[in-house]
Structure formats: C-alpha cells, structure tokens
C-alpha cells in the first residue's frame, strides 16, 4: 500500500521575497538554504554504471517542487526552465542523499541512494546522476517517511520520483522583474504527496496519474475531499473516478485532463481552465452537483451527458464544447460564450439564457421548453427537432437573423 507522506506545517513564500533574509547571503542575489528537491517524471532510466556497484540514473522531470527546510520552511513549484536557470546552485554536495520511488507491480517501491556527478542536458531537460545504493536515508528524507526501501534495479521505472536532500543548496533571490509572480499561501499543513506531487495550492504536476489512488479502498490513506488545490497546474492529468467533493480548484489549470466519473460535488472550479478536458463520455461522467464553474474556461471541453443543473455557470465559457445530452435545466447563464458548441439533445428546460451567444450552436432535439432567451443570439443555430414550447423571446436574434420581441411585454414573474 502506498504510504501517505505528510509535510509539517509550513509557510510558503515566493523565493524572491526579502523575508528569507535570515539565510546566509552568498551574494546580493543568492542565498544558502537547506532544501529538498523533488523531480517527478513519467519514467526514469536506470542503467549499469562504472564502477560495477553503481548505476546511471537519468530523469526528465515533468514537475519540480523545491522545499526549503532551513532556515524557514517554504515550498515552491518550479517550471523546468526556472530549474535550469538555478541548476548550478541546487546540488553542491559531492555526495547527495536521495530516495528514488517508482510504481511497481505491487505498488510504490523505493530505494535509498547516494548521488554524485550531477549533469544536465539543457536541450532535453534530462538530469543524470551516478547512483550508489545507500543503507539508510538522511534525517530529512526519513522525517518525510522516505525509508531505505529495496535494492535499485536497472531498467525503465514507471511513475518515478527522485527526492534529493541538498543541505548546502543555494536559491536565487528572484526579483519581480525576472521571475513569474507566485502567490503566497500561509498556514499550509498536512499536505499529502502522491507520486512526488505535493497536493497543495500552486503545485505544478503536469501529467499526474492521480487515479492511481483508486487502486486502494481507502485511497491509500489520502483524502481529496475538501482539499485546497487553488491554482494547481494539473494539465494532461488523470483524475478519473476520484472523490473530490468540496475540493477548492479555484484558478486551477486542468487543461486536457480527464475527469470521467470524478465526484466534484460542491467543488469550487471558479476561473478554472478546463479547456479540452474530458468530463463526460457515455455513462462515465463527472458529478458536478452544486459545483461552482463561474467564469471557468471550458473551450472545446467534453461535458457530454454531465448534469449541470444547479451548477453556477455565470460567466463560464463553453465555446466549442461538447454539451450534448447535458442536463442544464434551471441553470442561469448570462453573456457566456457557447458559440460553436454542441448542444444536441441537451436539456435546457427553464434555463435562463440571458444575452448568451448561441451563434452556430447545434441545438437539434434539445429541450428548450420554458427557457428564457432574452437578448440571446441564435444566428445560424440548428434548432431542428428542438422543443421550443413556452420559450420566452425578447430582443432575441433568431437563426435567420431576424429579431423576436414576442414576449418583451410579459414579465417572467407571471
């Protein structure tokens, strides 16, 4: 069973903030700091090295987290290009304590290593180390539950994470002009870690196979219910079948991710980017009961068959999205973008579609009975076979370009 790895309470600060002044200054732009570097990758290549009792470990990370241990705890998710800029100062010890974890046939496996001769291929972003087996891990790695594990084996190891304990590392004191702003999150504690990804706000874990938690009845002891994942970058990730009720995914980047069967009841997806995400397909659809999708970006997302009744859709953009067979009854939409979307067989009964751009939208066999189309633009929309009983028209642009003011005199309260 995969072990839950927890981090102690920490305050997460941008690395360029002057509040880390208590660290030893190497120069006016560099500080010495004890740190834990986490490289997360889909796979790692392990080949026999020289001498005979060593291996060459090559890893091309898709996500990188830098955790400050001393003098003040912090965490930062680094983009790979930023890691390359700071690489020279990140690993300065001749022999670096490390733990490599990977996913084997019986769950997560790990090996304690001593790394040396670090090198980097700037063109591919691949990091290479000479590794030797270690009898035990460092105190810092052990504190996070990363024990010695088993002997390392050569080959391609899947879902790999390399944890490096650099007690003499340096971090660049970024200025606002030379680095991307990083939001501060204070009071973060008890953050779980899965496949090297620390599940807390602003983490970057592209391609995360988080659905691996479904293999365990209790999710491997890790609960995603109500978890604060504000601003995380989970592009191309697999979140299928997870229980994420009441999770905070505000401003999360979930582009091209899969959330089939994911329970997002009550989740906050406000301002989230769901472009090209797959949330509906056959009977495996995301559960979004009472969720907040206000101002979310769902460009060309697949929400086919998803129940959106009662979901906050104010300001959401569904341009080009597949909303066929979607239940959007009694929802309120105002000035949302749904142009070129597919709404075939969708249920929009009694929906309030005020000033919504429905240009070129496929609404054939959709149920629009009792819907309010005040100010909406249906230019070029396909309404063949649609149920239009009791539709409220006022300043509505019809598919042929004409304006329908039939019900402007009638109050909706009536």
Image (cartoon, rainbow, N blue to C red):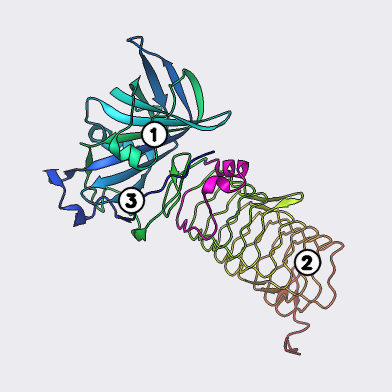
Horizontal and vertical percent position of residue 210: 55, 44
> Would you identify the image quadrant in which residue 268 lies?
bottom right
Query: Which residue occupies the foreground of this view, 11 or 326?
Result: 11
Q: Residues within 10 Å of mark 1 (few under 14, many from 20)?
A: some
Question: Is residue 120 in sight in this rendering?
Answer: no
Indicate which disc, 1 or 3, sits on the residue closer to the N terminus. Answer: 1
The C terminus: image quadrant: bottom right
Identify the residue at horizontal 52%, vertical 45% (top origin).
235
Q: Residue furthest right?
A: 385
Q: Nearer the viewer, mark 3 or mark 2?
A: 3
Q: Nearer the viewer, mark 2 or mark 1?
A: 1
> Would you identify the image quadrant in which residue 122 lies?
top left
> Would you identify the image quadrant in which residue 307 lies?
bottom right
Instruction: Please determine whether, in this image, residue 70 is positioned above or below residue 373.
Output: above
User: From which residue to which does the magenta span run?
Assistant: 208-233
Residue 162 located within the stretch drawn in magenta: no
Label of residue 387 in the image: none
Where does label 1 land, which residue? 147
Horizontal and vertical percent position of residue 243: 60, 54
Q: CA distance from mark 3 to mark 2?
A: 48 Å
Horizontal and vertical percent position of residue 291: 60, 65
Determine contact: label 1, label 3, CB under 8 Å: no
- Main SS, magenta residues: loop
Label of residue 180 in the image: 3
Q: Kindly state the secondary structure of the residue where label 2 is placed.
A: loop
Indicate which disc, 3 or 2, sits on the residue closer to the N terminus. Answer: 3
Indicate which disc, 2 or 1, sits on the residue closer to the N terminus. Answer: 1
Query: Which residue occupies the foreground of this view, 396 or 156?
Result: 156
Where does label 2 land, which residue? 400
């Amino acid at each position: 069973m995969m072990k839950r790895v927890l981090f102690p309470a920490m305050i997460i600060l941008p690395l360029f903030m002057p509040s880390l002044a208590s660290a030893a200054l190497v120069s006016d732009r560099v500080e010495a700091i004890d740190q834990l570097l986490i490289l997360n990758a889909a796979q790692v290549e392990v080949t026999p090295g020289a001498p005979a009792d060593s291996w060459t470990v090559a890893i091309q990370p898709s996500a990188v987290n830098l955790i400050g241990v001393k003098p003040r705890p912090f965490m930062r998710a680094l983009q790979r290009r930023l890691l390359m800029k700071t690489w020279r100062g990140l690993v300065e010890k001749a022999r670096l304590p490390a733990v490599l974890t990977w996913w084997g046939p019986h769950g997560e496996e790990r090996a304690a290593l001593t790394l040396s001769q670090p090198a980097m291929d700037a063109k591919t972003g691949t990091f290479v180390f000479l590794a030797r087996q270690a009898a035990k891990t460092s105190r810092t790695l052990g504190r996070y539950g990363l024990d010695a594990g088993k002997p390392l084996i050569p080959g391609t190891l899947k879902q790999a994470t390399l944890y490096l304990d650099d007690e003499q590392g340096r971090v660049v004191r970024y200025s606002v002009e030379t680095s991307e702003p990083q939001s501060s999150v204070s009071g973060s504690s008890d953050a779980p870690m899965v496949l090297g990804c620390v599940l807390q706000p602003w983490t970057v874990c592209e391609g995360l196979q988080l659905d691996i938690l479904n293999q365990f009845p209790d999710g491997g002891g890790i609960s995603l219910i109500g978890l604060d994942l504000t601003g995380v970058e989970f592009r191309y990730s697999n979140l299928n079948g997870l229980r994420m009720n009441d999770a905070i995914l505000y401003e999360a980047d979930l582009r091209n991710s899969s959330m089939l069967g994911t329970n997002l009841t009550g989740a906050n997806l406000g301002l989230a980017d769901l472009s090209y995400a797959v949330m509906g397909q056959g009977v495996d659809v995301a559960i979004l009961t009472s969720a907040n999708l206000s101002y979310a970006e769902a460009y060309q997302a697949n929400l086919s068959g998803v129940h959106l009744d009662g979901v906050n859709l104010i300001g959401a953009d569904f341009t080009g999205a597949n909303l066929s067979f979607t239940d959007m009854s009694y929802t309120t939409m105002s000035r949302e973008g749904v142009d070129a979307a597919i709404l075939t067989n969708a249920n929009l009964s009694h929906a309030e579609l005020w000033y919504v751009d429905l240009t070129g939208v496929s609404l054939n066999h959709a149920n629009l009975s009792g819907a309010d189309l005040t100010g909406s633009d249906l230019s070029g929309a396909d309404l063949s076979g649609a149920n239009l009983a009791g539709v409220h028209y006022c300043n509505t642009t019809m598919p042929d370009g004409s304006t329908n003011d039939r019900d402007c005199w009638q109050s909706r309260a009536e």
